[in-house]
Image (tube, coloured by chain):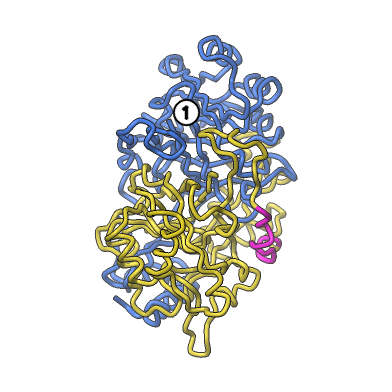
Chain colours: A yellow, B blue
Amino acid sequence: MCSPEVMSKVHEAVSRRRLLGQTGAAAAVAAVGVSTGSLSVRSARAQDASPVASPVAGSLPGGFSQIVDLSHTHGPEFPMYPGAVQMTIENLFTVADGGFYKNLLTLDEHTGTHMDSPAHFVEGGTTADRLPVELFLAPLVVIDISERTATDDDAEGTVDDIAAWEATNGPIPAGAFVALYSGWETRLDDPAGYINLDADSVQHYPGWAPEAAAFLVEDRDIVGAGVDTLSLDYGASTDFASHVTLLSAGKYGIENLANLGTVPATGATIVVGGPKHIDASGGPTRALALI
Amino acid sequence: MCSPEVMSKVHEAVSRRRLLGQTGAAAAVAAVGVSTGSLSVRSARAQDASPVASPVAGSLPGGFSQIVDLSHTHGPEFPMYPGAVQMTIENLFTVADGGFYKNLLTLDEHTGTHMDSPAHFVEGGTTADRLPVELFLAPLVVIDISERTATDDDAEGTVDDIAAWEATNGPIPAGAFVALYSGWETRLDDPAGYINLDADSVQHYPGWAPEAAAFLVEDRDIVGAGVDTLSLDYGASTDFASHVTLLSAGKYGIENLANLGTVPATGATIVVGGPKHIDASGGPTRALALI
């Protein structure tokens, strides 16, 4: 174990080397004997094992019986909206060489399973760090359009889909978070298939139809809406109308949600571990479904 | 609103400029007409208003009545363990100039209110992204030593403090998260006072005593332990014994917790929105107390 003085000195040495730029940083990593290769070659998807279930009904706080992880593992290879910066992970220390293991992260706020705050598309909108925490515990509604997306990459969650859900499950509960399940996460093993560009570089994946977004904010009482794809709008959108409608109404979005196919259509509760850095347009978000 | 093609081109232009390094990045920010000055001069602490309370008893999912935010707003000025890299936030786009607002973050995993995974100090230990999600919903125990820390910067949470808590509240519940409340967050307006270095650059702030950490992992059943200071160990520690004891036992830690003074000593539930990037030694964590 290194003394605090040694740890502090190593920290400072790395900080100084970082000022030298990329080459200096690489040298610093080399100096502490660490290879970062494994971070870039391992698939983020490979870590998404089945959600873990608690075995005893009602045994968790709040009378819950099971927790499902709605967040993907993300990393340097997680698919990004075209043109966005891929995350990098720079190892700073290992236990063997520095006394402890830690990394330096560089990432676009909109990486992995992440929140879009109202401020992302709305001048003067609420940033993620300022959203009231009561919005982060909500009835979870899951609207499944995976049957349609199996044959139509441009399928959207529509007002008809919401009506069909309500015909079976009753009205969307007040204060709900409404998630659209398209089954898109099966494509995460192949990021290009997840982004799904055509020959004209137009993206093709499901999202919320603008009319459905308008229905949710005008005719129902929701805290936010989510998708299991890269965007609240479907990939081929040219006007981001669903983003604008949801975020202008002060709702938040969550993109790239995981495991929605394993939670019930109604009855679960979502807990949203949203980002809390200052002035956040959004950020990686740990979302859990409590069942 | 910009078209997706324009957004993508702006993205790519910024990515290219980033390759030029600091100056290029600054030019890129200037090119989209954004000042990042406000991000560096605003105090993270200034955003930590009173925790938001839901007004209706039992009205939240799980029968909860109130949510308290246990995470501080963090940013470039949040105090860090000496020698660690301060977070930077680089604005990439604004709504006015790019059609949407977002930032690029560079941060040490151990920034703000954050998790320490077992892997942080233990070779081969579980990384934060791989911790089972059942560990993230737990009875919250708050042990208050703020009376002692008012006159002793080196005060530690001891086995006696745990015994006193149990004499009043009964045994620590199985699967609990045990947080030490020292009241240290009142110093966040002055980062130097929070880190509290003496003339020999030794830090002075409260933490868990190694014997208390050993008691918690050997004689009680906990999922993790937390502090409202920079380190699970008190600032003057030279061996990080509480870190090693807790993390070697497979428990996780949370440092820089907020608002512990506003939650009851027992009866609340903590939800831990831990980081989920690949191979995480830890990372910013949104922790909520459900009451």
Q: Is residue A61 above or below residue B33?
A: above
Determine if residue B79 is in view. Answer: yes
Q: Is residue B258 magenta?
A: no
Seen at 41% across and 25% down, the residue is B183
Check the picture and name the quadrant holding the N terminus of chain B: bottom left
Mark 1 Cα-neighbour bin, 10 Å: few <14, some 14–19, many ≥20: many
Given the image, on which type of amino acid does mark 1 rest?
A: Ala
Instruction: Using the rendered view, name the quadrant where residue B11 is placed.
Output: bottom left
Seen at 45% across and 23% down, the residue is B182
Q: Percent from the top left, x then y, of residue A136?
A: 41, 46
Instruction: Using the rendered view, name the quadrant where residue A260 is placed.
Output: bottom right
> As drawn, is B49 to the left or to the right of B163?
left
**Helix, strand or loop at disc 1?**
strand
The number of discs equals 1
> As drawn, is B264 to the left or to the right of B208?
left
Q: Tell which of A86 and A285 is nearer to you.
A: A285
In this figure, which residue is indicated by the disc labeled 1?
B268
Seen at 54% across and 33% down, the residue is A61
Check the picture and name the quadrant holding the C terminus of chain B: top left
Determine if residue B200 is in view. Answer: no
Q: Which residues are magenta?
A: A38-50
Residue closest to the far bottom: A199
Q: Is residue A248 above or below residue A235?
A: above
> As drawn, is A170 to the left or to the right of B166?
left
Q: Is residue A41 magenta?
A: yes
